[in-house]
Image (tube, helix red, strand yellow):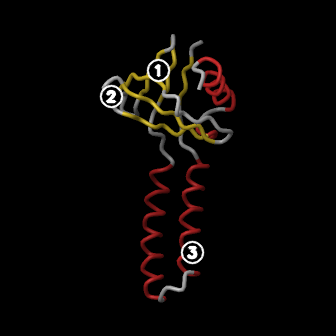
Amino acid sequence: MNLHLGLSGSRLEQWIVLTCHGLGVVALWLSGLPPWLSMGATLALGVTAVLSWRRSGRPRLAQILYRDASWTLVGPNQQLWKGRLLPSTRVGRWLTVLHFRLNDGRFMAIPVWRDSLGREDYRKLQVVLRWVAKV
């Protein structure tokens, strides 16, 4: 079975990042810290929320290719990596985290959010991972 997936940005990831930052702000103000300290930490969380929001919408990879039991990862700048899928890969309904050991020995974890692929492509990825790659 062959698989060719083109990844796009994920709104779901962006909203989860923003929600976590918002919960952090609420926890700060409920913690009983002095107001000046809570205000400074809220400002810091606001800056990291904006930076994380901007970065989280972009996929780490442009494409994922699976052909003849071989995985090829294509970066946004067309850089190619070949590797093998590790059994620590997690398949979920909304998020799949692919763990790869690259041919140069490095480890790479790739989150694939459900909305970063079309419905049919996400289903194909799950089929390949569960039945062909036996994760």
Dot placed on the residue nearer the N-terminal end, 3 or 1 = 3
CB contact under 8 Å: marks 3 and 1: no
10 Å neighbourhood of mark 2: few (<14), some, or many (≥20)? few
- Which class describes the residues within 10 Å of circle 3: few (<14), some (14-19), or many (20+)? few
Q: Secondary structure at mark 1?
A: strand
- Label 3 with label 2: CB-CB less than 8 Å: no
Q: Residue furthest front?
A: 87
Which quadrant of the view contains residue 117? top right
Q: How far from the left and from the top, in percent, is residue 36?
A: 44, 88
Q: Secondary structure at mark 3?
A: helix
Closer-to-camera residue (90/75): 90
Q: Amino acid at mark 3?
A: Ala
Q: Is residue 24 left or right of residue 74?
A: right
Residue 71: give its label: 1
Give the x, y percent position of residue 34. Answer: 47, 89
Q: What mark, if any, has residue 94 been given in the picture?
A: none
Q: Quadrant of the N terminus?
A: top right
Disc 3 designates what residue? 27
> What is the CA distance from the residue labelled 1 to the residue labelled 2?
15 Å
Residue at 51% over, 10% down: 68
Q: Hey, what amino acid is under mark 2? A: Gly
Corner quadrant of residue 16: bottom right
Query: Quadrant where the C terminus lies?
Result: top right
From the image, tell me which residue sits under label 2.
Answer: 105
